[in-house]
Amino acid sequence: MKSLQIETASLTYPIFIGEGIRKNAVELLSSLNLPMTKILLITDDEVDKHYGEELFNLLHSHWSVKKVTVPSGEQAKSIDMFMKLQTEAIQFHLDRSSCMIALGGGVIGDLAGFVAATFMRGIDYLQFPTTLLAHDSAVGGKVAINHQLGKNLVGAFHQPKAVIYDTGCLATLPDKEMRSGLAEVIKHAFIHDEAFLKDLFTIDSIVKITTEQLNDMIYKGVSIKAAIVSQDEREEGIRAYLNFGHTLGHAVEAEYGYGEMTHGDAVALGMQFALFVSEQVLNCPLDRKHIKNWLKKLGFPVKLKREVSTESLVNRMMSDKKTRGGIIQFVLLDQIGSVSLHSFKAEEIERWLNVWRMEEIE
Amino acid sequence: MKSLQIETASLTYPIFIGEGIRKNAVELLSSLNLPMTKILLITDDEVDKHYGEELFNLLHSHWSVKKVTVPSGEQAKSIDMFMKLQTEAIQFHLDRSSCMIALGGGVIGDLAGFVAATFMRGIDYLQFPTTLLAHDSAVGGKVAINHQLGKNLVGAFHQPKAVIYDTGCLATLPDKEMRSGLAEVIKHAFIHDEAFLKDLFTIDSIVKITTEQLNDMIYKGVSIKAAIVSQDEREEGIRAYLNFGHTLGHAVEAEYGYGEMTHGDAVALGMQFALFVSEQVLNCPLDRKHIKNWLKKLGFPVKLKREVSTESLVNRMMSDKKTRGGIIQFVLLDQIGSVSLHSFKAEEIERWLNVWRMEEIE
């Protein structure tokens, strides 16, 4: 088992990474010295099938626990599900010294984290991530639910007290979800670590990724994210770098309809567009053809479907949380491993998006 | 105009108090140097009739503002109204550098404050209180909405960037609301300032309170609350003292049904019970008969109505946010001006409540 200490302005907490460590839940949780008068264990019905009962039984032998499941998928990040969990917490008599545990991927972490952030104005929570994508969401304390007009628009900053990352749980992850998580790993490499990106280039198939590679990816991905978040917890500065690929990515995800395209696939498209803009604006030396072919081989989309209009994507970007005063914030690559933040008017982005969509670099 | 600086661990902000200062809104807001790319002005339909257009027009001359009104009364602190305001904020294209302004009493401050705390994970907000009760809620950064199972159960800590308290707005306040606010003023005197309490004893009618007395009450009440909150922003210690009269008060308010009894009337009952328990447990020397008669003269309730069962009140107290591990926290008076925190089992509270309800000290 490896462990990492995440430092933010408001809290320092550990991330434990290792295969099979969920079985040590009682020891790991006890070591944190939290009051835990009660525990609300929150998971989704897919994850529940594999790991729900096992973790519930472990915790139940030491603490007063209730398990609640929500439907799997992005639609669980709704205001209705948020209130349902608040009701469960009240009815199970959680108090301010109680704790919520998120067992699942990013959706469960975001949802349970936001419930914990607001239940009685904030109680402790812990994460047990079960996806590769969660290596990203489990660090940094961003929690939120979706509004029908946009993703993650209602939320808070609420750091977990610990993250217990059992990479053994990734064995049951569908390829599509593994690829979705890989996109954020690739993003972390792009913005911060050229050598790591070169390692990733050697992967040519999702199914061939080994547990050892997974452990390494998670450790490096988490480290990069933690280094950035520790300097800027509330996204007032360099934390925005993590948004590489996400300005278009979020718009694509919303425009296709949540669940139609995974977060990672949308981010993969967003990164390709960001690379294109970086080349145009900063003359960043990139072999985009090679990158595109590699992403395609891994199963990522490499172009937007025709039915989605450029105009609607730009409108989505205009209502993005990072957009201020009508100016769209865009993270561009100066070179691999180094990024900077740039501001563009909607018309500029629209023009580039049209050019990029016409481009053929197969 | 007087001003006070509120210091908390997370933020320091000013409270301006004075008659007619709402008319200087532009100068006061400009002095804060906030980005304010847009302003969402949130008020209720009663307050709107008196001050909504006036403030909107003032702000509109300098900033991009949208005014949104919600129904007046406690029922506005609902999840539906919360989401309606989130939708308004998104549709008016507020961004992270925008600001929400709460024009109204505690309900509007709590609701708008919680929307601001969670919109895009937290943006600036300002308060323009229009009630006496708001002198309490405008200090300390507690914001929340109600759950059908309890008051203020879903919320956050989010400090305003400034509070602009125009005591002239209190002229249009109904007597019932003035009395509700007076209860919190009395509470602040009880827990921290015997001389102030003696001043208050000289008031024998709500309608005879002068603007000068109001200015003084607000200044002293705010000062006491600020002194406590500055030492304990997140209610981990002495901030709990502010809960004097509230353990039973919240239960009464919920059991009667929100809106049936004002917050202040419920707190007045709660304080009388807390004085009774203080006498029993700490032998605190109190002329409860005098206090009861004074409260009665001011129009406060002095006994619980028979239909409300002691058992249901105790059950409500058991699910209070301050209750931890099944133990009810109670703030008791050691002497006037000095309080301490005590823990009781539900059965003890139930027994005292029954004795107190039987008591006749007219």
Image: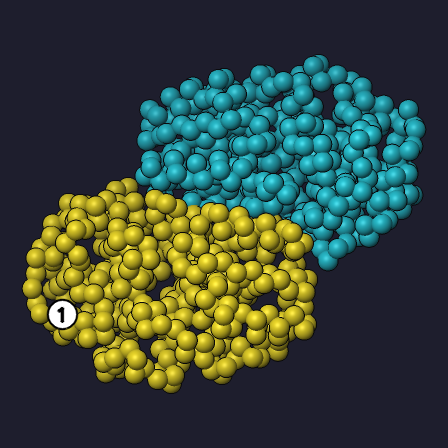
Chain colours: A cyan, B yellow
- Label 1: few (<14), some (14–19) or many (≥20) C-alpha neighbours in 10 Å: some
What residue lies at 11% left-to-right and 50% top-to-bottom? B351
Q: Quadrant of the C terminus of chain A?
A: top right
Q: Chain of mark 1?
A: B
Residue at the spot of label 1:
B288
In percent of width and height, residue B238 lies at: 33, 60
Indicate whether A211 appears above or below B121.
above
Q: Find numbered disc 1 in the image and state the secondary structure of the residue it sits on.
A: helix
Q: Is residue B128 left or right of residue A349?
A: left
What residue lies at 28% left-to-right and 55% top-to-bottom? B253
Indicate whether A196 appears above or below B310.
above
Q: Quadrant of the N terminus of chain A?
A: top right
In percent of width and height, residue B275 lies at: 18, 64
Decide which of A315, A77 is in the foreground and name it.
A315
Decide which of A174, A252 is in the foreground and name it.
A252
What residue lies at 59% left-to-right and 56% top-to-bottom? B123
> Given the image, on which type of amino acid does mark 1 rest?
Arg
In percent of width and height, residue A225 lies at: 65, 39
Q: Quadrant of residue B236?
A: bottom left
Q: Quadrant of residue A141?
A: top right
What residue lies at 77% left-to-right and 54% top-to-bottom? A327
